[in-house]
Image (spheres, rainbow, N blue to C red):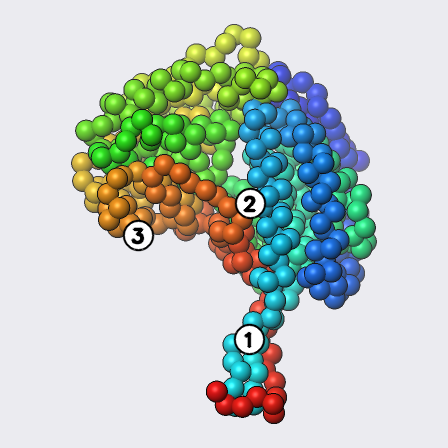
Amino acid sequence: MGKLISTNPADNYSFVGEVEITNDAQIKKKLSEANAAKTVWKELGVKGRIRLLEPIRDEFKARADEIAKLISIETGKAIHESTSEVTRYISELTWFLENGPKALGDEITLKENKFLHRIVYEPYGVAIAIAPWNNPFGMAVWGIFPNLIAGNTVIFKTSKECPVVGKLLEEIIQNHNLPGGVFAEVYGPGVGEKLTEGDINLIWFTGSTSTGKELYKIAADKFIKAVLEMGGSDPCVVFKDADIGRAAPVIFKGRFKHSGQICNALKRLIVHESIAKELISALKEIIESKKIGNPLDPRTDLGSLVAERQQDLLAKQLKDALDKGARIVVQIKLGKSLKGAFFPPTLLTHITKDMRVWHEEVFGPVFPIVTFKTEDEAVELANDTIYGLGARIITEDKKRAARVASRIDAGSVAINYEARFVACDPFGGYKNSGLGRERGVQGLHELCQIKVIQQRDDSIVKA
């Protein structure tokens, strides 16, 4: 049995820890146990399941600092961002726990003329949840707990980039009295594919579009449900009436948080030609004020990328752009003491549509900038992507904002300077950004079979 080795990408790939790679026999056993447990877990009912899950949430709260520190060590994320991740997703977990009974309660659709019709939400059975590395705690929360609340048993695969975080979360969950087989975790390359070969009823996945499409094919062959949240190349459209002083910090955070390694980060800046120079200057000032370094240092604003392979991919995307005529207008010099997967925040202009930074997802701190003259041109540029996860519009004209938001093909559109991603809102995308929705009442319903029960009741009179 092999080991999955974890290294620190912000400390010259120093050793962090190791976990046992899950072998074929163990995968088969976990699948068998999950199938054996699904009836017991379903029959507990949503309130019974939540009573067993609430103590896990409480232990997450008690160990939040420990979890956040490990996230920073294993992924290179700045500690203030890791702390924010843990706090935010504990809050989202609380929303799922508090709202699950109402969201999954029976709904009466007809009550008249001696007939009662109601919708009931029932679990699919065994769900496999496959999560990425960029928010290892948050994506575990999204993949595991809504499924458990809905009544599915869960086998969770964490990313190979953060197995030690995954192991810690598994230990916390297993500390509590869930029935055997209700939750299990697997580790290592290829184990996700092995899981899909087994007796499963639902695939939940967050990650790359290429992997998501392969999983969709598997789901189609097995004729089972798939909920897929995949890549994104979110546009930020800035009109000429924007308040640059307010817009620049929002745009910086939207692009460069976690060094740009977020699925719904702003990845293409589309700005009116009359204010482009001023906005670039404002962004340059902000970028140059930021500290890049040790993610555990509370003074650090930006840490590293998650792995050397991400660094190499980003370098190739940048080189392709420069070879085709792009110009660097801002690029921060990295300190010589930084050893690992660091990459300098970079702003690019003179972008053309054949460049990889335009038509591919750029998962790192490189920001291509294009200009526009008209609203129609801005919308065309915003939609010029195979993705459709999110978007932002910055303008003081409310009518224009509403008009443009209705024309952008994306699962969420934020208008102006504040964007809140909260548990009550469904999350997902158009086009190659995925199928189905996570979070919110809609996200819980995605994880359930919907059954209509009709019955005669002589006590009901015609309304």
Mark 2 is on which residue type?
Thr
Q: Nearer the viewer, mark 2 or mark 1?
A: 1
- Whether pointer 2 and pointer 1 mark residues with C-beta atoms closer than 8 Å, the reply is no
Name which residue lies at 64% across and 53% down: 97
Residue 134: image quadrant is: top right
Q: Earlier in the sequence, mark 2 or mark 3?
A: 2
- How far apart marks 2 and 1 lie (CA) works out to 33 Å
Point 31% across, 48% down: residue: 405
Residue 406 tag number: 3
Query: Which residue bears the numbered disc 2?
Result: 206
Q: Secondary structure at mark 2?
A: strand
User: Where is 231 relative to 450, above or below?
Assistant: above
Q: What residue did someone put label 1 on?
A: 108
Q: Which of the 4 image quadrants contains residue 200?
A: bottom right
Q: Nearer the viewer, mark 2 or mark 3?
A: 3
User: Dot 3 surroundings within 10 Å: few (below 14), some, or many (20 or more)?
Assistant: few
Across and down, in percent, residue 184 comes to 74, 48
Question: Residue 430, which numbered label?
Answer: none
Task: Give the secondary structure at mark 3.
Answer: helix
Q: Nearer the viewer, mark 3 or mark 1?
A: 1
Q: Position of residue 253 (x, y in %)?
A: 43, 30
Q: Tell which residue pokes out farthest to the top in this image.
A: 336
Tag 1, which secondary structure? strand
How far apart marks 3 and 1 lie (CA) works out to: 32 Å
